[in-house]
Each structure stands twice: as C-alpha cells, then as structure tokens.
Amino acid sequence: MNIESIKDTITSLDGNAVDSVKISFVEKRKNGVTSYIPEISPSLRESIMELYCRVLSGQTFQYNQEPYNELGQVDDVLEIATLDVGNIKNVVESITSQENSCYDLSEINLDKINYYVVTFDVSDEDIYFFRRFNKQKKLRRGLRGYFTGNGFVQLESEVIGLDNDIDIIVYRDEALIINRYALQTVFDLSDYFLGKTDQAMRVIEGYNKINNFESFENDCKNDGTAIKRLTKIVNTPQLITGFFDNMTQLPGVIRDMHLSITLNADGKIEYSGTKEERTQILSCMADKYYITLLQGQLGEDKLK
C-alpha cells in the first residue's frame, strides 16, 4: 500500500465538500452492524485530514510491508492482507450500507460502540481508517468532541476522541494491518479461520491419505494453532498438493527429524490423536523442515 499516495490523496480533498470526510461510530450486533454518522463541520473535516496526514508521516509507516502471516507478525513490519481475511470486504460493505446507517445520534449508546471508521471519499476508491473505540481513553494528542443533536463538535474537554492511532487501513483491494488485535475485535477473524480450515480439510480428505480422518479434522478444528496453520496452508495452494504428491519423501523426513508420525503398509498416515502428531503432520504439509545448504544441518521454519 502506497502511503505517500494516500497522503497526497487526502491532502487534495476539499474539506468544504460534505462527503469528503465522514466518521462512522460502529456498533456490532448479532445480526450485523449499525453505523452512527454525525454531521461534522468543514473546519473539523480539515482538522481530521491534517491529523491523519501527520500520523501517516510517522516512523511506523516507514516499515517494510509484507503479506499477512496467519501464524504471527515479525517486529517492525506492517502486513498487507487481502479483503477476504476477516471478511473485511463484507464488513466494509455493511458499515457503508444506507440500510445500516443511522443519522439520529440520540439513539447512540457509547458503551456499545466497538470501533469507529474515518472515511475519505475518493470517488469510487474510498480510504477507510479503522480504530477500536474506548470512550474512557484519555487522549494525549488528537481531536476531542461531543455529540450535539445530529452533529459532532470539536471540544477541548475530554468526552470522546479521535486519537492519533490507526489499527487498519483499507484501500482498494487490500488492508494494511497496523494492529493485529483489531483484526479480531473489528472484523470476523474466527469465522475466517474456521472457513479456511474447512476448505483445507475438504482438499486433504480428497487425497484419502490420512486414516482416522474424522478424528484428525475434529481435533484440528478444536486447536487454535492448527486452525491458523491450516489457513496459511490452504492460502498457499501448492503446499497441500506438493505434500501429497511427494509423500514418498515422508518416511525420510520422519526418520531424520525424529517425528512421531506413523505410516501403514500402504504409505497412509495412521493418525492416533496426539497433539504432537497433529502438529507434525501440519508442519510437514507446510514444508517446515529443511536441511541447510552450507552445513547440512536439519532445521525447522517457525513462521510456516
């Protein structure tokens, strides 16, 4: 995601245009969301534009950007995710839908607000800044305000605030993740992982190479680490295919890495139900084990 391009785009907006900048305070419900959208003045729109351009100029946004890794994040790296992660695309469509929008701020209950979204209107390519909401948080820097009627008015005293932290930026077909925790609290990460796990299981089942497969599937779906690993595996299509196409190499890996995986006479995996065995099977699918080129030492890639 090109941060400089985003800053230039925000700077070019006309704060006098009503739709140039919008704030949505979002309440997550069991059957969807409600977006409470206050009226804001041109001067506040200009202040918001300046605030976010200033934040985007910070050191954090100078970090390298790498693809989202379901298993963990490397320090001082920002991750880029597709919009199917956490059903981000569907969430954006929900919060921007007129059906879910409320302009009567008398109905808002701040205790139920989960996050807010600042939207910069760029024709058909809006930029969305997501931030978890905590009305009790004391602001050190940023913009403060309060609701009056259907408007949102800037205020010096502490009421609610738009702080200078950003959790996730959504622009075009990708999301820049600044705070991974927000993926769970703002979006539907659990459903995403479970859906991807089920997708992986259907592919694995089709190869018919794991005995006691039903137990293997159930155990994986009840193992948080296994779910994340399967999501990463299925998002890299060649891994599952490569594993089963090269199962003749598995006995050597089991021997050299001293794994607890057992194969029967037909070369199928005999799954017995232990977590160690389950972890090792998924590690083999992820192609985690390797031999170094220089010293020929055995190793394991922790990020796979």
Image (tube, rainbow, N blue to C red):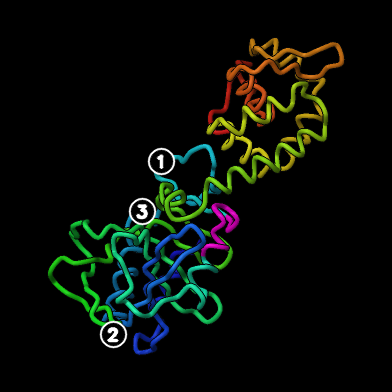
Graded by Cα atoms within 10 Å as few (under 14), some (14 to 19) or many (20 or more), the crowding at tag 3 reads: few
Q: Nearer the viewer, residue 97 or 120?
A: 97
Q: Give the residue pinned by disc 2.
A: 41
Q: Relative to residue 59, is residue 217 drawn left or right?
A: right
Of helix, strand and loop, which one carries label 3? helix
Q: Is residue 300 above or below residue 92?
A: above
Q: Is residue 185 above or below residue 57?
A: above
CB atoms of marks 1 and 3 within 8 Å: no
Q: Residue at x 52, y 62 (%)?
A: 91
Q: CA distance from mark 3 to mark 2?
A: 30 Å
What range is drawn magenta here?
A: 82-91
Q: Relative to residue 133, is residue 250 drawn left or right?
A: right
Amino acid at the residue labelled 2:
Ser
Amino acid at the residue labelled 3:
Thr
Q: Earlier in the sequence, mark 3 or mark 2?
A: 2
Q: Residue at x 62, y 41 (%)?
A: 231
Q: Residue at x 82, y 32 (%)?
A: 207
Q: Give the residue pinned by disc 3.
A: 60
Of helix, strand and loop, which one carries label 1? loop
Q: CA distance from mark 1 to mark 3?
A: 11 Å
Q: Give the residue pinned by disc 1.
A: 75
Q: Quadrant of residue 53?
A: bottom left
Q: Position of residue 213 (x, y in %)?
A: 74, 26
Graded by Cα atoms within 10 Å as few (under 14), some (14 to 19) or many (20 or more), the crowding at tag 1 reads: few
Q: Quadrant of residue 157?
A: bottom left
Q: Residue at x 81, y 25 (%)?
A: 209
Q: Earlier in the sequence, mark 2 or mark 1?
A: 2
